[in-house]
Structures are given as structure tokens and as C-alpha cells.
């Protein structure tokens, strides 16, 4: 395990030729035409991957990346905490022995570990830390010339989102890929339903309703030797500076579908209400446990977005209801209804969307056709931040005001120690900045 930089080996040239055997493996469970890889048949070069954030999603994402080709290798890991990194490394060395080439010298810890990983000879980096760190880590990755898989959300405040928009432009100019972890965009059912609705199957969209009504998530108890920064990092979900609050961290998946249905055009304004009713204990930091937001588009369409994280025997549902001038649709519920009769259900193949997004990433890299999901991942993040801010402040806020907000969340300095515990926002008192 190292806290020191690895010498850069920039002399190693990317890219990338591969064998037909690799294409067959990649094609498994994918609808992409990876047969195009065949140009390099007979030669072989690996793609070297680094992972930043070795938690639940990072450990899953690296497996998805390895599934995408037998010639993909994980060569470096980075996490804030040694226990998380070690667990992830051990799992990889057990389950994916042939594709795991991690050494003590390519494992990095702490706030600056990502910079050290990015100095190594990796081709692709997976960004799977809490959302607060995304803008700085994405910028560093693109500056270092790496292709990126970028988990959602891509920030927690407007300055972060503006930075990601700039970085995405840098990536475009450098020919580097940024594939977003907004995974429903890579799901066959959702792609089919959104495509049909956008093609006018139910007429013109008039209203969208997004539900993410779910239960409680994990929480880690405080330990005696943890500073407040340590506690907040271990419990990042519950601090809005780290997660953005659950409307940003989780409900973004639904809001992204609404944005997609609207042709990736942002709304004009939003208002809403929310609060903290059940999860009131101090161990739950300062986030809310429910939000209800009305988003208004320039053409009169409204999206009503509901999300809740509460326990007990309550109604739970994650679905997308779309109402049109001729009929209605449920996206995850998989039905299109005209004249009160279900007239369509998607019945095609549905490979694992988490694998599919990685197939797209590595296919794009190997074929020199970079993918850039930068704009929609930024807009969906800002859409969710707008929803949070209207509920925190009680105000109606425009997209333009939100995009220009100067409010920067998080402590002055990133270091272990006693940082403030942020206050629970109060509508009517919390200011929009
Ligand atoms: N697309 C999806 O369906 C999906 C599903 C789950 C999570 N996610 C997203 O993935 C991200 C991670 O979520 P998770 O569930 O894996 O959380 P997690 O807590 O399991 O993992 C996060 C890891 O990042 C580490 N970390 C924290 N700060 C770091 C830093 N500055 N540098 C390096 N490592 C750092 C933590 O120690 C932890 O191991 C979040 O943005 C979350 O929204 C996406």
C-alpha cells in the first residue's frame, strides 16, 4: 500500500488492438456490434484500469469493466480507507485472478490518493467515490489523459456541475471518453420506452410523474477514534455536502429519465416541499427523508417528482408515469396504454445495463469513437440539486438562477479533524445563494 506517487510511464502507447476472442466475450449480453473490433485480430494489447472509490458500487463497476473484455485488467486501486481498499482487492484477487494485476505500489489511500493513481500508467479510471469528490477527480482524470467511467451524480452544487461541464468539453477536445453511471440510459427496456414516447406513441407529453419511494439505507456507528470528518466520510449519504441529499444521490435516476423524455432540455423553474420526519436522529446528519418537487418546462409540461427514504410498512415504488395527449406509459412498469388498453410491452432482450455501459465505454475506446455523456449527466445532476434547493429554501427557483448559484458545499479544508456538523435546512430560513 503506498501513499507515494508511482513514476509515470507515459511512454506506454495506447491503443488498442484486440482479438476476435475478446469481441465474442464482450458481445455476450450486449446488443452492440463489437465485431467491428476485428481490425486488430491476431494482435493483443490490454486496457489498464484504475478504480477510485472501492466501496459497493466501485467493487461492482470494476467487475462490469472486467466483464467487458478478457483483455481488460485492473492494475490500480484508490480509496480513502485501507479496510475498504483491502476488501475490494481481496475480492478481485479471488474472483478475477487472471485480470487483477494490483500491487502494493499501485494502491493509494487518503484525500490525495486519486492524484497518485492518475500518475500511473492506467488507460481508464472508474470514479466511484461520494459525489462531492466527482468534479475534482473528473478534472484530474481528464487532465491526466484518462478515459473515464463516471458514477452519478457528478457533483453536489452548481460550481461543481459547472466544472464538470467544462471538463466534459476538455474531454471532447482531447478525444477522451466519459461514460456516465446513469445506467438506465443503457437499459434496453428504458431505451425502447423512452424512444417510443419521444416518437409520439402517446401523442405530445403533457405530464410526467417520477416516483422513487423507498426504504432506509445503511448507517455506520461512530467509533471512539474517529474524528468528525472520519464519521461524515463513513456516513457520506447523510451529509448534503458529500451526497447532495438523497434527491441528488438516488432520485437522480428518475429525474434523468424525465430530462431524457424532454429531449435533454432543462426546465425553466421548480418549487416543492420536503422535510425530515422519520430520520431525525443526529446520526442521520442533515439530509431530508422526503421531497416533492414540481418542475416546469417552457412548453407547459410539468414533472411531479416524489422521493422518500423512510422505513416501516409504507408504499414503495420506483416508476415513471408519462401522460400524453393520446395515452399514457409506465417506463419501468413496461406498458403503453391507449384508450385504457395496454397496447405495448417491451419483450426484447435485456442484458445487464451495468455491463452494457462498460461494453459501450471500452468499445468506444477500442474503436477510437469516444463517448461523451458529459452534458446530460451534468444537467440531470443540476436538476436534482434544483429540486433540493427549492425544498430547502421554500422558494421557486429558476434553472438560470440555479446554474449561476455560487454556493459551494463542504469544508474549507479537506483533512481529518473536527469539521462542523452542517445544520438541517429549514424552508423560509435557509437562504438560496
Ligand atoms: N449507478 C448506480 O446504480 C449506483 C448504485 C450505487 C451507488 N452509485 C453511486 O456510486 C457512488 C459510490 O456509492 P457506493 O454505494 O459505492 O458508496 P460506498 O460508501 O459503498 O463506497 C464509496 C467508497 O469511496 C471511498 N471514498 C470516499 N471518499 C473518497 C475519496 N476522496 N477518495 C477515494 N475514495 C473515497 C469510501 O471509503 C468508500 O469505500 C455514489 O456516487 C453513488 O451515488 C451508483
Image (tube, rainbow, N blue to C red):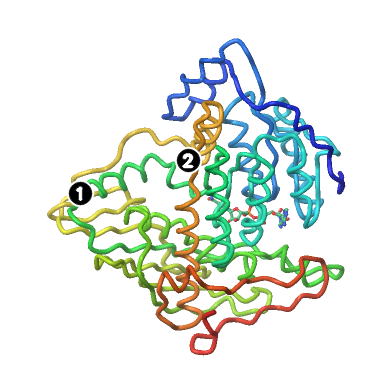
Residue 367 is situated, as x and y percent measured from the top left of the image, at: 52, 26
Q: Answer with left or right where residue 281 lies relative to residue 187.
A: right
Q: CA distance from mark 1 to mark 2?
A: 25 Å
Rendered residue at 67%/78% (across/down): 422
To which residue does mark 2 refer? 353
Residue 6 is situated, as x and y percent measured from the top left of the image, at: 83, 40
In this view, 72 is above or below 86: above
Rendered residue at 33%/64% (across/down): 209
Which quadrant would the C terminus be assigned to in this image? bottom right
Q: Nearer the viewer, residue 133 or 58?
A: 133
Q: Are marks 1 and 2 in contact (CB under 8 Å)?
A: no
Residue 266 is situated, as x and y percent measured from the top left of the image, at: 38, 62
In this view, 203 is above or below 75: below
Q: Answer with left or right where residue 201 lies relative to residue 369.
A: left
Rendered residue at 42%/70% (across/down): 400
- As drawn, the label of residue 200 is 1
Rendered residue at 57%/47% (across/down): 170
Q: Residue furthest left?
A: 339
Q: Nearer the viewer, residue 315 or 277?
A: 277
Quarter of the picture for ligand 1?
bottom right
Amino acid at each position: 500500500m503506498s501513499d507515494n506517487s508511482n513514476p509515470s510511464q507515459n511512454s506506454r502507447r495506447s491503443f488498442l488492438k484486440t482479438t476476435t476472442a475478446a469481441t465474442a466475450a464482450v458481445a455476450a449480453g450486449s446488443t452492440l456490434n463489437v465485431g467491428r473490433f476485428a481490425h486488430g485480430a491476431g494482435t493483443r494489447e490490454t486496457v489498464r484500469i484504475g478504480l477510485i472509490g472501492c466501496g459497493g458500487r466501485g467493487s461492482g463497476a470494476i467487475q462490469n469493466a472486467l466483464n467487458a473484455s478478457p483483455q481488460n485488467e485492473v492494475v490500480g486501486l484508490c480509496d480513502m480507507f485501507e479496510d475498504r481498499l483491502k476488501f475490494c482487492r481481496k475480492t478481485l484477487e479471488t474472483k478475477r485472478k487472471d485480470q487483477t494485476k494490483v500491487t502494493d505500489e499501485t494502491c493509494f489511500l487518503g484525500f490525495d490518493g486519486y492524484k497518485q493513481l492518475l500518475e500511473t500508467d492506467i488507460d481508464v479510471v472508474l470514479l466511484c467515490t461520494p459525489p462531492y469528490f466527482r468534479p475534482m477527480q473528473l478534472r484530474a482524470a481528464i487532465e491526466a489523459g484518462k478515459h473515464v467511467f463516471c458514477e452519478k451524480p457528478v457533483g453536489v452544487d452548481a460550481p461543481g456541475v459547472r466544472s464538470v461541464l467544462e471538463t466534459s468539453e476538455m474531454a471532447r477536445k482531447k478525444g477522451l471518453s466519459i461514460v456516465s453511471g446513469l445506467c438506465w440510459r443503457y437499459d434496453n427496456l428504458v431505451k425502447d420506452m423512452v424512444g417510443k414516447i419521444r416518437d409520439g406513441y402517446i401523442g405530445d407529453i403533457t405530464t410526467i410523474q417520477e416516483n422513487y419511494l423507498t426504504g432506509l439505507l445503511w448507517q455506520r456507528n461512530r467509533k471512539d477514534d474517529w474524528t468528525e470528518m472520519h464519521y461524515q466520510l463513513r456516513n457520506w449519504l447523510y451529509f448534503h455536502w458529500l451526497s447532495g441529499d438523497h434527491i441528488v444521490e438516488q432520485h437522480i435516476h428518475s429525474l434523468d429519465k424525465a430530462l431524457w423524455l424532454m429531449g435533454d432540455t432543462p426546465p425553466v423553474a421548480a418549487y416543492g416541499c420536503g422535510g425530515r420526519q422519520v430520520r431525525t436522529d443526529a446520526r442521520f446528519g442533515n439530509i431530508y427523508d422526503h421531497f416533492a418537487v414540481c418542475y416546469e418546462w417552457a412548453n407547459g409540461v410539468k414533472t411531479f417528482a416524489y422521493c422518500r427514504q423512510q422505513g416501516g410498512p409504507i408504499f414503495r415504488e420506483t416508476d415513471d408515469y408519462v401522460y400524453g395527449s393520446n395515452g399514457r406509459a409506465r417506463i419501468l412498469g413496461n406498458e403503453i396504454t391507449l384508450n385504457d388498453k395496454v397496447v405495448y410491452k417491451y419483450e426484447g432482450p435485456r442484458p445487464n445495463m451495468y455491463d452494457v455501459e462498460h461494453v459501450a465505454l471500452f468499445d468506444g475506446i477500442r474503436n477510437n469513437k469516444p463517448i461523451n455523456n458529459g452534458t446530460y449527466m451534468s444537467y440531470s445532476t443540476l436538476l436534482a440539486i434544483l429540486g433540493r434547493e427549492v425544498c430547502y429554501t421554500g422558494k421557486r427557483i429558476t434553472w438560470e438562477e440555479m446554474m449561476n448559484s455560487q454556493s459551494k458545499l463542504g469544508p474549507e479544508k479537506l483533512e481529518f479533524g473536527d469539521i462542523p456538523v452542517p445544520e438541517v435546512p429549514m424552508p423560509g430560513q435557509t437562504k438560496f445563494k
